[in-house]
Image: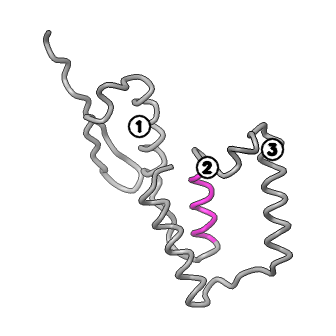
Amino acid sequence: ICPFPHFHCQTQFVLSLLDGSCPLPSREEMEREIEAETASRLGRGIATRHLLKLDSDQWDYNDELALLGRFQPLPPYWKDLYEANKGHRAEDLLNYKTYRYTVLNDREWTVQRPRAQNA
């Protein structure tokens, strides 16, 4: 996952629970939701040991927390930049951490790759 924005959404959600702006459903409703989500993930072929791994599902999860908690969702660049960085990591494992990202606005960002060094 992309930890800091993920934790931000979880924290905002908990705050909305504490201030009463987002009431919890009944225990029975929560257990039904857990069962349905578990069945859905197993149905998509996710191994039991990986049921709690979000990977790219983190973005829908964060959006759902924002909707339920009535706070602003993450700007779209977070998902796009994170997913692009996963690709950069797969393509260029030795150098991807040296890429420089610049966020231009809520939807746009750029990446500057390091120049190839002469051997």
Instruction: Answer with mark 1 or mark 2, whichever residue precedes in sequence.
Output: 2
Whole-percent x, y for residue 54 in the image: 61, 49
Point 80% across, 65% down: residue: 33
Q: Nearer the viewer, residue 109 or 59?
A: 59
Which residue lies under the disc numbered 2? 54
Quick one: which residue is furthest to the front in this view? 49
Q: In this view, does 74 lie above or below 21?
A: above
Instruction: Answer with mark 3 or mark 2, whichever residue precedes in sequence.
Output: 3
Question: Which quadrant is home to the C terminus?
Answer: top left
Whole-percent x, y for residue 2 in the image: 46, 51
Tell me which segment is drawn in magenta. 57-67
Point 81% across, 81% down: residue: 26
Magenta span includes 38:
no
Point 61% across, 87% down: residue: 21
Quick one: which residue is furthest to the top in this view? 119
Instruction: Answer with mark 3 or mark 1, whichever residue precedes in sequence.
Output: 3
Which residue lies under the disc numbered 1? 85
Q: In which quarter of the image is residue 34?
A: bottom right
Q: Do the residues labelled 3 and 2 touch (CB within 8 Å)?
A: no
Q: Left or right: 91 with respect to 9?
A: left
Measure the alpha-carbon separation of dots 3 and 2. 13 Å
Q: Is the magenta stretch mostly helix, strand or loop?
A: helix
Disc 3 versus disc 1: nearer the observer: 3
Magenta span includes 59:
yes
Disc 1 versus disc 2: nearer the observer: 2
Amino acid type, mark 3: Leu
Q: Left or right: 15 with respect to 34?
A: left
As drawn, the label of residue 42 is 3
Local secondary structure at mark 1: helix
Amino acid type, mark 1: Asn
Whole-percent x, y for residue 65 in the image: 60, 68
